[in-house]
Each structure stands twice: as structure tokens, then as C-alpha cells.
Image (tube, rainbow, N blue to C red):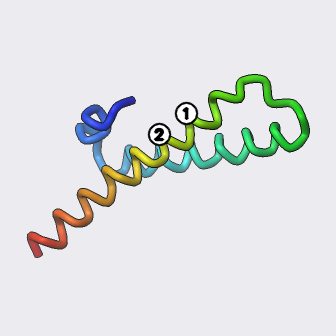
Amino acid sequence: MNASELRAQSDDALKSRLLDLKKEQFNLRFQKATGQLENTRRVREVRREIARLLTVLNERRRAAAVRA
């Protein structure tokens, strides 16, 4: 999902997606540590998607602070 698609979603949806990705990231780290990880590329994809989500959420937070 790219940043423009993320910007179209609500804060609640983004926070929910962030929680899901954090859980997936934990599971991927656990799989890597136990030698069960098959798709190593997914670790990078999840990390970058988390960064995108946090970027959009921070943009919104800063925009709200400027308006206040």
C-alpha cells in the first residue's frame, strides 16, 4: 500500500493496520530466530510499511498541532 492510499484512510484504520503489522513483524522475527522464516523479503516489506504508516500518522498529528 502506498502513501497516497494510506492518506485516504481514517486514523482508526491506520492504527489498526499498524497494530497488525507490529504483530506480524514480531512473528517474523520469531520465525527468523528459530530458523523457520521462508520469505526473508517480507521482513523488509513489513518494516517499510510500518514506516509509511507512522509517517502518515505523524503528518496528521503535526497538521492538527499547527491548526490548534
The percent coordinates of residue 44 (x first, y second) are 59, 36
In the picture of the structure, the residue carrying the numbered disc 1 is 45
Given residues 20 and 36, the one toward you in this image is: 36
Label 2 residue SS: helix
Horizontal side, residue 15 vs residue 7: left or right: right
Which residue occupies 73% across, 39% down? 28
Horizontal side, residue 51 vs residue 5: left or right: right
Total numbered labels = 2
Instruction: Give the alpha-carbon distance from disc 1 to disc 2, as whole Å.
Output: 6 Å
Which label belongs to residue 58? none
Label 2 packing within 10 angstroms: few (<14), some (14-19), many (20+)? some
Label 1 packing within 10 angstroms: few (<14), some (14-19), many (20+)? few
Residue 43 is drawn in which quadrant? Answer: top right
With respect to residue 65, does 7 lie above or below?
A: above
Q: Residue furthest right?
A: 34
Q: Amino acid at mark 2?
A: Glu
Tag 1 and tag 2, C-beta contact below 8 Å: yes
Q: Quadrant of the C terminus?
A: bottom left
With respect to residue 12, does 37 lie above or below?
A: above
In the picture of the structure, the residue carrying the numbered disc 2 is 49
Horizontal side, residue 1 vs residue 38: left or right: left
Given residues 47 and 11, the one toward you in this image is: 47
Which residue occupies 25% across, 41% down? 7
The percent coordinates of residue 45 (x first, y second) are 55, 33
Label 1 residue SS: helix
Q: Residue furthest top?
A: 38
Q: Amino acid at mark 1?
A: Glu
Which residue occupies 31% across, 50% down? 56
Q: Quadrant of the N terminus?
A: top left
The percent coordinates of residue 11 (x first, y second) are 32, 51
Q: Residue furthest bottom?
A: 68
